[in-house]
Image (cartoon, helix red, strand yellow):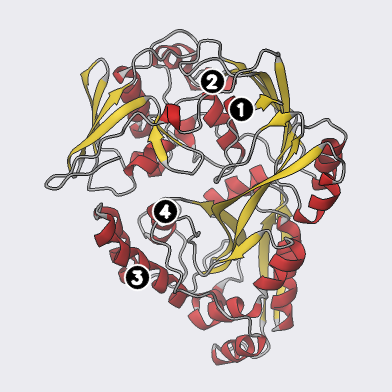
Amino acid sequence: MTTRSGVGILVGLVMGLAAGLVPARAAAQLTVTVCHTQDLSFIDPARGVLLNELNNLWVNLYDGLVTRDPAGRLVPAAAESWEIKAPTEWIFKIRRGISFHNGEPLNADAVKFTLDRYHEKDKPRYGAVATGVKDVTVVDPYTVRITTPTADAAFLERLFEVPILPPGYMKQAGEQGFIARPVGSGPYRWVEWVKGSHFTLEANPKYWRGEPAVKRATFKLIPEIATRVSATKAGECDIALQVPPDLIEDIEGTGTVRISAAETPRIIYFLLYPQSPVGGGAPLADQRVRAAINHAVDVDKIIKFILKGQAVRVATLYGRQTAGYDPDVKPFEYNPQRARELLAQAGFPNGFTIAMDAPIGGNPIKPVEVAQAVASDLEKVGIKVQLRTLDTATYAQMKFGYKLAPIFMWNWMAFEADYILYPQLYSKAQFFLYAGHTPEVDRLMEQERAETHPARRLPVLQAAQRRMRQDAPYLVLYQQKDLFAVNNRLRWDAVPGGYLHLSTIQAK
């Protein structure tokens, strides 16, 4: 990608075919079983964020205008190129020859239809996309003009989460019909979804990059770690997600399964939510209490003993791969004595009782064990924790409905800083939760979003990290690695972000 001075032109080069996304080909009729941790939720892309197991449905079933290469960089997909004509005006050239699974062409009309759906009134829509797109105009059958409300440094990240949908099929089937049988243009076609059991995809023989080697893939739901590992060792799973670090040696000892790991900018943290409807969160409104919570938890011990070193300590919601990461912003020191002093200063010399929520599956590795360790450390400084665990699908729905406990575990991954900061730090954003928020935080978010020049944007992003460290709105733990168990009959390696592109798998 290149930029030029003046208005600034950004051209998306045709990099996708050279970026490790070309489907692997093999003569055998290869079938694969993937064992994953949570059921599907938002099958209609307009209704929810690209989240957890949806990653592995969406990147295989659909095409977006852009996609990620194995290094995590955004590269062309359905859009073969783009340019910025003005700070709020983007022109995309659509790749010719792409068809949806029902035969419809993927063209400018399909792009406009897809993005216009995010603005339909009185329907649940994913706000990060809806608020980021002002208007879409069809210039010609394979060119679209997209305008944004303001200059938007994260606009391409926004488009990454927008699978392009077929207008004719959507209008014919309706939203419920589409949810029952979704249609995309990706390397795989929908076969079935048995809720609570599995979903199955089959290769698209007319995929524009070429037919993939894996002809059929079943994603089997196994939330329980022990059951998932046993199934992997028995050969019932070809690829298993969220492998516990303490079982790496045991799994590789089979001689038939190996571990593939990738460091990804996924941050595991607890939100501190004073206004929780569960109640009891009032102490969290005091910055001294939030700082005490951060000092009270021995994160390094959690990384060493629970995660077996498969994580990296971070100070804020930034991962080391996130643009603008500032290594000079240091995590809170583990200091229980300082935690007790801060609690006493805040008026809680004897601590208090508070509820905590954690999921039983999803992207965090061993979330229940981590939550139990956090609760134990907090109780040592007088904060008595009432821990509740929930299945991951319910947990996500409750989070988006602002119904979780005053302290609750969450995770977020972003290669682009805005994508992890703005939704949570900006007071008008859809997922805003920032204890101790001030207008200064909003000002920083507005600045970083409007400034698209990397050199001028960097000090703003660094200031946001320093502000987060000062306000302590979250109990930030670490940046974890994604661990996959892979049967040795397959040639496939994990990539940053945890995306499982079936089309990159081949037989050995």
**Mark 4–mark 3 distance (CA, rounded to whole Å):** 17 Å
In the visual, does 445 lie left or right of 279?
A: left
Labels 2 & 1 near each other (Cβ < 8 A): yes
Q: Label 1 neighbourhood size at 10 Å, few (<14), some (14-19), many (20+)?
A: many
Residue plotted at (51% across, 18% down): 183
In this rendering, the label closer to the viewer, 1 or 3: 1
Residue plotted at (67% across, 64% down): 356
Q: Label 4 neighbourhood size at 10 Å, few (<14), some (14-19), many (20+)?
A: some
Q: Which amino acid does label 1 sit on?
A: Leu
Looking at marks 4 and 3 on the same chain, the residue that comes earlier in the sequence is marked by 4
* SS at badge 2: loop
**Mark 2–mark 1 distance (CA, rounded to whole Å):** 8 Å
Residue plotted at (42% across, 67% down): 326
Q: Name the residue under label 3.
A: 463
Residue situated in front as seen by the camera: 134 or 220: 220
Q: Which amino acid does label 2 sit on?
A: Pro
Q: Which amino acid does label 4 sit on?
A: Pro
In the visual, does 188 lie left or right of 354?
A: left
* SS at badge 4: helix
In this rendering, the label closer to the viewer, 4 or 1: 1
* SS at badge 3: helix
Q: Which amino acid does label 3 sit on?
A: Ala
Q: Name the residue under label 2.
A: 187
In this rendering, the label closer to the viewer, 4 or 3: 3
Looking at marks 4 and 1 on the same chain, the residue that comes earlier in the sequence is marked by 4
* SS at badge 1: helix
Labels 2 & 3 near each other (Cβ < 8 A): no
Q: Mark 4 points at which residue?
A: 423
Looking at marks 2 and 4 on the same chain, the residue that comes earlier in the sequence is marked by 2
Looking at marks 2 and 3 on the same chain, the residue that comes earlier in the sequence is marked by 2
Return the mark for residue 502: 1
